[in-house]
Amino acid sequence: MTISSLGYVGFKASDLAAWSEFGARILGLMPVDAPDGTLRFRIDAQAWRISVEPGDENDIAYAGFEVAGPGALSDMAERLRGAGVEVGNGDPELLKLRGVMGMITCRDPDGLAVEIYYGPTERRETPFVSPVGVSGFLTAGQGLGHIVLSAPDIARSRAFYSDILGFRLSDIIRMRLSPEFGIDLEFYHCNSRHHTLALAPLPMAKRLNHFMVQVDDLDDVGFALDRVNAAKIHLTNTLGKHSNDHMVSFYAETPSGFEVEYGWGAREVGEDWRVVRHDKTSIWGHKRQ
Ligand SMILES: [Fe+2]
């Protein structure tokens, strides 16, 4: 029994007005009713996937990982406790707030709040409609997308996400930061999405380097790129294609300073997946701006 997907994320942000505009008008996410003072967005049938809450951190505040049901949840609690991780039971208030049926909570080795849950709320009676006409976001069987986290103590992070939560290594990319110094980015999957989680083994200004959402059509990426440019938003990486997941994507700066990757066309991992290493993050493009 392992994590089945990244189900939702919560950000703390100082400029919610900017996020409201950025989420809906640039990324094409669907704004939905949210508890007082927060912003919530849908990208599919699930009641919400991204929450932006007031706070000065401008970083990820929590990650919600979904499991199949109550059995998987209690198995996960047992595994975490067996490994010496402090586990809380999601209180009824929190369950209600998140709209899920059951939850346990813990912290990853870097202190990120991790919520493991089953039974999210779906709103199929109100279809997902993007305010700027995005044809759709790819989530079926693959969850929200992916997150890339700073993991300065990579051995501890690897043990937590891989040995306990059950994420499986997809591949690594050796990233050269200077002629003498490189780091190995580690990419992990928990379903057919090439990576739901990537760990960067170095301290960074924020826990979250970027999050990724995947659209159904290449044109959705192109239209989003046009919106980013028209709004003079900082394009942090030009359009490019990643060496490992083959995603065609660009990166832009969010109102909180961390980045969003907006992509299409990633390949998926299957039964015959082999772990390999790459020396470049991208086959073409993705030029740092
Ligand atoms: Fe990414």
Image (tube, rainbow, N blue to C red):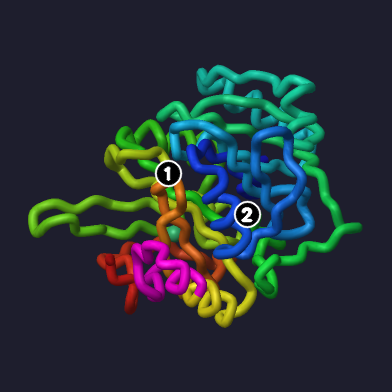
Q: Amino acid at mark 2?
A: Leu
Region of the chain picked out in magenta, as a range: 227-245
Q: Is residue 198 visible?
A: no
Residue 143 x/y as whole percent: 65, 54
**Mark 2 vs 1, N-terminal side:** 2
The residue at the point 74 percent across, 50 percent down is 32
Look at 71% across and 35% down and name the residue there: 117
Q: State the mark number for residue 208.
A: 1
Query: Callout 2: 10 Å neighbours few (<14), some, many (20+)?
Result: many
Please state, as top left, top right, bottom left or bottom right, where the C terminus lies in the image: bottom left
Q: Amino acid at mark 1?
A: Leu
Q: Residue furthest right?
A: 125
Q: Residue at x 60, y 20 (%)?
A: 87
What secondary structure is marked by label 2? loop
Q: Which residue is mark 2?
A: 144
Q: Quadrant of residue 100?
A: top right
